[in-house]
Amino acid sequence: ELGVQAPVGFWDPLGLSKDGSTENFRRRRATEVKHGRISMLAAMGYITPEFFRWPGFLSPGNGLKFADVPNGLGALSKVPTAGWAQIFLYAGFVENSANDFGWFDGSGNTDFDGKLMSSAMKKKERAPGDEGWRPPLLATDDAE
């Protein structure tokens, strides 16, 4: 059955998979994995500055050092506009180059209805979240 996982079996309290569509289920699962990864990075981005700061300048033209940027939401007002532009451009680049997996295909075509993602997953037959990368010393060929 679609979406069954041990030990809880099938769990869909909001009824999002009532339609029984495998493509929609896989798209939602891929989106869930992606959002989970973004949330983990955001949490680390919030915690890390408590223990580590880059040396040097964040914005040499403004005389702003990394050490001058406060933690948490206070940092939002300190980062210059050009810095935010770089962050958004980099995020767009990462999203656009995600191996035909996400909101864009490799050519930059948008995929707001999920058709490109579904075709990419069928074509490559990979599980949601499988980007084809195996971390050294952490991944094995053992199925268990």
Image (spheres, rainbow, N blue to C red):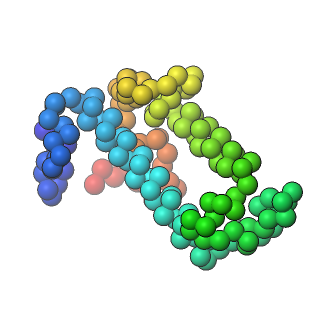
Give the residue drawn at x 16%, y 31%.
20
User: Where, by quadrant of the figure, is residue 26 drawn?
Assistant: top left
Asked whether, in this view, residue 32 is left or right of residue 67, the answer is left
Q: Position of residue 42 (x, y in %)?
A: 50, 59
State the residue in front, 64 or 124. 64
User: Where, by quadrant of the figure, is residue 63 drawn?
Assistant: bottom right
Residue farthest to the bottom? 51
Q: Position of residue 101 (x, y in %)?
A: 46, 33
In the rendered image, the vertical position of residue 16 relative to residue 78, given as above or below: above
Give the residue drawn at x 41%, y 49%.
35
Residue farthest to the front? 77
Q: Is residue 40 visible?
A: yes
Q: Is residue 120 visible?
A: no
State the residue in front, 113 or 107. 113
In the rendered image, the vertical position of residue 28 relative to residue 63, given as above or below: above
- Quadrant showing the N terminus: top left
State the residue in front, 82 or 27. 82
Q: Position of residue 14 (x, y in %)?
A: 18, 46
Q: How many marks?
A: 0
Give the residue drawn at x 73%, y 72%.
67
- Quadrant showing the C terminus: bottom left
